Amino acid sequence: MGSMPPSLFSSLPEVAKDEVFSLMAQYHADTDPNRVNLGAGVYCCDEGKSWPLRVVGQVEKNLHELQDIGRHDYLAIEGDPRFLAVARDLLFSSAFESEDDLRRSTDSRIVSVQTISGTGANHIGARFLAENLRPRRVWLSNPTWANHHAIWESVGVPVREYPYYNKDSRTLDFDAMIATLEREAQSEDVIVLHACAHNPTGIDPSHDQWMAIAELCQRKQLFPFFDSAYQGFASGSPVQDAWAVCHFYGLQPPVEMCVAQSFSKNFGLYGQRAGAFHLVMNDPSYAARDTVLANLSHLIRSEYSVSPRYGSTIIKTVLESKSLSKEWLADLKTISGRIKSMRAALYDELCRLKTPGSWVHIVDQIGMFSYTGLSATEVEILRKQFHIYMLSSGRISVAGRE
Ligand SMILES: Cc1ncc(COP(=O)(O)O)c(C=O)c1O
């Protein structure tokens, strides 16, 4: 064999590995019997194992028995319309008094497409806005889900950060958030907001604070981009967890906005990649909606053509049925209740051990994560000496795995 010609790819720039996934790989390579994985955002049950939702297992069994001959067919580019209708109603329905109101309003203002879960919805939304709104910048909370940075950088929109977390008090830095946005945000900037269970801090604005954020967005004409990855998972009530989205949706005069919706956590369908992107427009005409839908479909076609159908079929089956929806709500209560009791157990144990410092934030925070306040050095000691894996920011998944 002759000598190998040089590769065109040998001198690519180094790229940092994704912290969550590389931590998971380190955890799997660790053979210590007492290893604990608190890094990944996956809910685990008392035995420290994954917990497929009971209602999901039941629907899977029924679907398998049905052997629908179309079960492996392509979906439409924009997705399964019945899945999109229930996904949309899950988010927006509590904004309206009556079913009729809901149907009329959602039909005329919201354009929805199916996506590769929440990450895909964030990405398609970012691409769509980058190309069609052309914002001067996007505002992300400091800190935020690390992928928000990667997604917005990939579509070439300059990222700015608004203060969110006060390290000293371990609370929301609301005054600094508002002051920064008042001073520096400009009309048609995008602002990314976590609909509930802020990742990584587990701290959400109060209703009054959400109202003030909404008023600011309205007055300064910022474009709200909600990321909804934990609806129902935070409080146990999907309606309560959609409060902020519905408040913005019901504003008068109306604001245009969008929502990236994930079903990874609230249906435990992490690997099935079910999600949706919803754009709320101020033009209720069918012509405008059709054009937006055509533009979104054009983006999707060149990226992944169509979404997977397994997860969305399960979600559609549950949410279209009153009795299965009830069972889903019961599963959500089990999950959110157990997370709350794990928080309380951790807090009690820290107090019992007279661990220096205040730990009340552990029980005050909401959702699957706790921002412990541990430093990167402390996190490293826990990993190296005790085989406990968590993000260097000190974020832990409260219901992690053995
Ligand atoms: C804030 C936030 N947005 C979006 C997602 C998207 O997750 P997925 O793509 O698995 O639906 C996550 C998952 O961890 C998240 O925490």
Image (cartoon, helix red, strand yellow):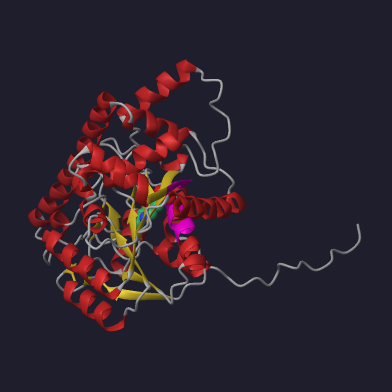
| Residue stretch rendered in magenta on the structure | 112-125
State yes or no: residue 116 in magenta. yes
Residue 170, by quadrant, is: bottom left
State yes or no: residue 316 in magenta. no
Identify the residue at horizontal 51%, vertical 18% (top origin). 67
Is residue 328 placed above or below 168 in the rendered structure?
above
- Residue 379 in percent (x, y) is at 31, 63
- Residue 82 in percent (x, y) is at 41, 34
Q: In what quadrant of the picture does the N terminus appear?
A: bottom right
Is residue 344 placed above or below 226 in the rendered structure?
above
**Residue 148 appears left or right of 219:** right
Between 93 and 100, the residue placed more toward the observer is 100
Q: Is residue 5 visible?
A: yes
Residue 183, by quadrant, is: bottom left
Q: State whether the magenta stretch is mostly helix, strand or loop.
A: helix
- Residue 4 in percent (x, y) is at 84, 63
Between 163 and 47, the residue placed more toward the observer is 163
Between 399 and 236, the residue placed more toward the observer is 236
Identify the residue at horizontal 24%, vertical 80% (top origin). 182
- Residue 227 in percent (x, y) is at 34, 56
Q: Is residue 26 visible?
A: no
Residue 245, by quadrant, is: bottom left
